[in-house]
Amino acid sequence: MNSFINWKSFNWSEYGAEFLGTAFNLLVGFSIITFNFGKGLPMERLIPPESPRLLINGLIFAGSGALFTISPLGKLSGAHLNPCVSLAFWIQGKMHGRDLIGYIISQFLGAIIGTFLVTKLWGGYALSVNNCITLPGKIYPLWYVFLAEVFMTFLLVLCVFIFLSHHQLLRWTPLMVWLLVATMVWLGAPISGTSLNTARSMGPALISWFWQDQWLYCIAPPLGALIGVGVFRLIAMGEREVLTGKLFHVPHYPCIFKNVKVPHLKKQY
């Protein structure tokens, strides 16, 4: 009897790469947060002001994602590492629905495993920074935090699409994302925690079983991604198209994305 589901049509290697990439990104990112802000660790004495430590957080957290993007696994999956980014590519017509689901599940599982590893590696130090749960800034109203997350995710998606729609800018996308996200972490973390990524927020929330205000990170970043796609379409006016679904496209790697406008190797099933 034939199965109703053709399991061979799913791109398991790409999903696995997204899982590993998300876990790696959060393991590195949450470790640097713990190292910089964990109680009893030396950074608080060495660099008392919070702003420089937030900048270090951003550079290393975002840098680990950029490094994964140009790695063999990142070149394979496209290194979205973020359900909101995958959602934006799907809305733009670059992903099959089954791959969107596969990517999102893999990203959430990677976020859970990455957070779990951080709690085991850093123990009480991670607990002293609430296991890196994304939290609104105490002095900001929730509506302001919500709008900050919407705006930052919108800007991330818009910039990614602009770079991926220009042949000259295409290969510089990982560098741009690194610098942009690092800046957002530096400036935005005191306001909203700079999630930009629902999986990044749900991983620590699930491990810690802490759900206060977490609805915000389930709604604001995806909404920002939707607005980013809409604004890109207004700017492009049909004259420019996102060329690929990968943040670092190389033509000799298999490509599972739709409507790719640059040389690529189609995956064989």
Image: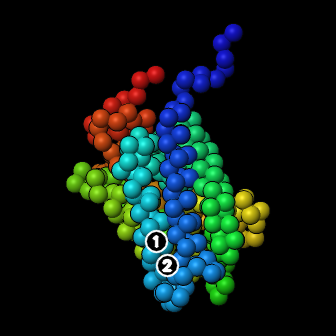
Q: How many labels does the image show?
A: 2
Q: Position of residue 13 (x, y in %)?
A: 50, 35
Q: Position of residue 261 (x, y in %)?
A: 31, 40
Residue visible at 67% across and 20% down in the picture: 4
From the viewer's perspective, is residue 26 above or below residue 95?
below
Q: Which residue lies furthest to the left in this view?
A: 168
In the image, 187 versus 52, the foreground residue is 52
Q: Can you identify the residue that label 1 sits on?
A: 58
Q: Are marks 1 and 2 in contact (CB under 8 Å)?
A: yes
Quadrant for the N terminus in the image: top right
Type of residue at label 2?
Answer: Leu
In the image, 113 versus 93, the foreground residue is 113
Q: Is residue 218 visible?
A: no
Q: Can you identify the residue that label 2 sits on?
A: 54
Q: How crowded is mark 1: few (under 14 residues within 10 Å), some or many (20 or more)?
A: many
- The CA span between labels 1 and 2 is 6 Å
